[in-house]
Image (cartoon, rainbow, N blue to C red):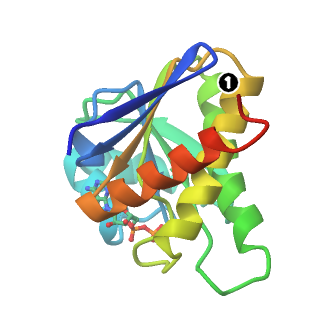
Amino acid sequence: MPSIIYEIEDSCLELIKGDITTQKTDAIVNAANKALSPGGGVSGAIHRAAGPNLREECRTLGGCKTGEAKISKGYHLPAKYVIHTVGPVYGESPDDELCLSNSYKNSLYKASKNNIKSISFPSISTGIFGYPVKEASEVALNTIIDYLRKHPGIKLVRMVLHSDEDLQTYKSTLEKILNSPGQQ
Ligand code: ADP
């Protein structure tokens, strides 16, 4: 399935199937754990590709709470920065949706503060943390669109999905959001 690009104000929101570690955007986002240790999934892949200096820097960042975001250098990654955010473990609290939205919002805010113009996200919380992809896609895309409408500066937000199925789910959700009344 080819990539899909939508224009939101002066910015682009792109959905692709791919590997977050190879993205050549200014920053990539890590679906991190609270200790900011390598772990598995996206985080393990990012740490392997970035090299051991990323782990060293992460040790100095003081961990990360659910919904918050921290920034580090990208080391051997094509991206200059990694923004680490911890999504909610699905079903652990009644605030799952708010926490997931905060992960996207605070990552974008960190990007704006660091003058980052392009950023790639994985589908936060939908792997080991068990968030259903459809529900997560609604939170992710609504939050990103809302942010782009309010904050000019970031020119490209790329959602990097790991499977055709996830890409299709995100695409359907985005079309539904953009076609809903009040979005024109
Ligand atoms: P979480 O712990 O937040 O659930 P995971 O890393 O377990 O994070 O998974 C988040 C999502 O990222 C899952 O949908 C998973 O399939 C996907 N994923 C795993 N590896 C990669 C990768 N290299 N690039 C992009 N997405 C990935």
Please say if 178 is above or below 102: above
- Asked whether the viewer can see residue 29, the reply is yes
Return the residue at label 1. 113
Which residue shows up at 60% across the image and 58% down it? 138
Q: Could you tell me residue 19's position as x and y percent? A: 23, 48
Q: Is residue 119 above or below residue 60?
A: above
| In the image, farthest residue toward the bottom | 91
Residue located 49% across and 78% down the image: 129
Image location (x, y in percent) of residue 148: 66, 28
Q: Secondary structure at mark 1?
A: helix
The spot of residue 173 in percent (x, y) is 53, 54
- The amino acid sitting under disc 1 is Lys
Q: Nearer the viewer, residue 57 or 177?
A: 177
Task: Pick whichever, 51 or 178, lies toward us.
Answer: 178
Find residue 136 and report its image quarter: bottom right
Quarter of the image with the C terminus in it: top right
Q: Quadrant of ligand 1?
A: bottom left
**Which image quadrant is residue 89 in?**
bottom right
- 153 vs 178, nearest the viewer: 178
